[in-house]
């Protein structure tokens, strides 16, 4: 016999299912069948989804309460970004030295744009690459560096925290990266060399009107084992650092009613400041006054490329020019003997609305390639994460420098804070590299980064 199965109509009202209704329920009340259906549905719930009173044996593995730790070391370890170190630094440091570090010139537009430049990018990762091992090592100016980042020159560093240049140089030595001492540092060339005898120490020079004093510093740097001289060329006059003006910032900090009140909230900073060696410009004669007055009275606004020629003849090690802000000037200083350039607008502390180094980078890279130049391209300003560093390297930089990023760590916790800042950046770089699908820096290309809006 042939059975014909009629196609079902999805819009038809289904007939009631009475197959499971017991015969004894035929005369029962209308709600009886619904109660049975609910009971059957409840019986069908998996055991794992049924509510029950929890047993102690179930809770015990979850009850792993840790004793709260309030030490500075514990707080530093909990910091996972440079921004978090900055928050710690602000709580621990009086307003004047914190603002000296954190601030920039005039409306601080340059600094804001420099940081935004690293935010306005899109990474373009590759997949299915072997990234089980990440190598962040590189060569810079003829010697190896364990990481593609060094510490930039910063003035008055012991004002931010009493360990100052000693913490920075020792942390750099431990991390296997270069450290740059500023002419306006608060530790001498010789003391830094003694504090970090196995570190790679560079010296940053401001050329003065007094050439004999410049020559004296150059000779001291060479004698102390510095292999690289970094001459800064963007400070013909001082920038208008308005936070310093409003704070009445002087070197050393002056004890006014405002600073005494500010100190009451940060006793540890003042205790360290008052119980350590007085703050002086270790590479200069004793000086008291504002930062702007010092720059305007001691540094030479008449410098030309002929002075760079003199410096090239005088200094026998590697020579780097810091403060390059145009492609033309980058090419020109290399023509005058520079071994490398630092694309930098002084951290936004000189000319507001200055060119942004990250934006300048591709043009300088293209020009050097066209010139067949092997001069190193180093970048600073705006770096606040390891991802920023990787983006700069992908766009053509050979190396990077950090200033504020390490000073936030210094103010947050001295030497341990600088160590933590470098650890954060290293972890950021390692993770970013792996997610991009590259295992060594030489694999980075401009294709890994797209600048948004361009």
Image: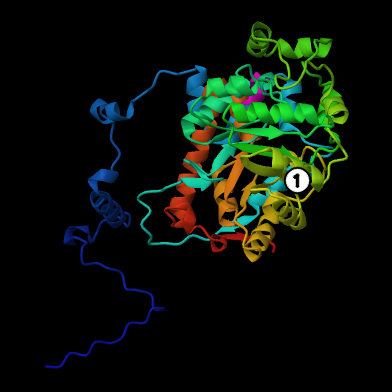
By what rule are the colours in the image chosen?
Answer: rainbow
337 with respect to 210 (left or right)? left
Residue 237 image point, x, y percent: 86, 36
Find the magenta span and give its range. 89-93
| Crowdedness near tag 1: few (<14), some (14–19) or many (≥20) residues, C-alpha within 10 Å | some
Q: Nearer the viewer, residue 98 or 366?
A: 366
Kindly indicate the quadrant of the structure image that contains residue 152: top right
108 with respect to 185 (left or right)? right
Q: Is residue 256 magenta?
A: no
Q: Residue at x 71, y 31 (%)?
A: 102
Q: Main secondary structure of the magenta part?
A: helix
How many numbered circles are shown?
A: 1
Quick check: 272 above or below 115? above
143 with respect to 263 (left or right)? left
Disc 1 element: helix
State whether residue 381 appears in this view.
no
Q: Residue at x 73, y 16 (%)?
A: 280
Q: Residue at x 54, y 50 (%)?
A: 390
Residue 257 image point, x, y percent: 83, 10
Residue 193 image point, x, y percent: 56, 24
The residue identified by callout 1 is: 309
The quarter of the picture where the C terminus appears is bottom right
Residue 429 image point, x, y percent: 50, 45
Quick check: 296 above or below 252? below
């Amino acid at each position: 016999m042939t059975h014909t199965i009629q196609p079902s109509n999805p819009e038809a009202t289904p007939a009631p299912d009475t197959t499971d209704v017991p015969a004894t329920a035929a005369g029962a009340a209308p709600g009886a069948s619904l109660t049975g259906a609910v009971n059957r549905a409840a019986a069908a719930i998996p055991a794992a989804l049924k509510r029950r009173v929890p047993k102690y044996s179930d809770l015990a593995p979850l009850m792993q309460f840790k004793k709260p730790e309030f030490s500075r070391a514990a707080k530093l370890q909990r910091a996972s970004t440079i921004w978090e170190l900055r928050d710690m630094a602000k709580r621990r440091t009086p307003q004047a030295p914190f603002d000296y570090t954190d601030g920039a010139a005039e409306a601080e537009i340059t600094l804001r744009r420099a940081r935004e430049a690293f935010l306005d990018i899109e990474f373009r990762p590759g997949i299915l690459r072997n990234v089980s091992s990440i190598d962040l090592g590189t060569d810079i100016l003829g010697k190896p560096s364990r990481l593609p980042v060094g510490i930039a020159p910063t003035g008055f560093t012991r004002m931010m925290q009493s360990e100052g240049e000693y913490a920075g140089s020792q942390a750099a030595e431990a991390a296997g990266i270069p450290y740059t001492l500023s002419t306006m540092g608060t530790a001498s060339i010789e003391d830094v060399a003694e504090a970090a005898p196995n570190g790679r120490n560079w010296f940053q020079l401001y050329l003065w009107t007094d050439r004999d004093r410049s020559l004296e510093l150059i000779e001291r740097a060479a004698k102390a084992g510095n292999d690289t001289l970094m001459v800064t060329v963007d400070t013909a006059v001082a920038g208008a650092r308005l936070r310093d003006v409003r704070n009445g910032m002087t070197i050393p900090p002056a004890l006014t009613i405002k600073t005494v009140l500010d100190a009451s909230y940060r006793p540890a900073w003042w205790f360290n400041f008052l119980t350590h060696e007085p703050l002086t410009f270790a590479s200069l004669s004793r000086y008291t006054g504002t930062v702007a007055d010092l720059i305007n009275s001691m540094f030479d606004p008449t410098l030309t490329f002929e002075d760079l020629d003199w410096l090239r003849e005088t200094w026998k090690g590697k020579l780097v020019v810091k403060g390059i802000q145009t492609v033309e000037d980058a090419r020109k200083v290399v023509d005058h003997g520079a071994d490398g350039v630092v694309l930098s607008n002084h951290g936004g502390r000189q000319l507001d609305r200055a060119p942004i180094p990250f934006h300048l980078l591709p043009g300088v890279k293209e020009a050097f390639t066209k010139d067949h130049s092997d001069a190193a391209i180093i970048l600073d300003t705006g770096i606040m994460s390891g991802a920023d560093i990787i983006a700069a390297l992908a766009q053509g930089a050979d190396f990077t420098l950090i200033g504020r990023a390490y000073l936030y760590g210094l103010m947050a916790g001295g030497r341990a804070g600088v160590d933590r800042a470098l650890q954060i950046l290293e972890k950021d770089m390692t993770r970013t590299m792996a997610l991009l699908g590259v295992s060594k820096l030489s694999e980075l290309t401009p294709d890994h980064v797209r600048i948004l809006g361009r």
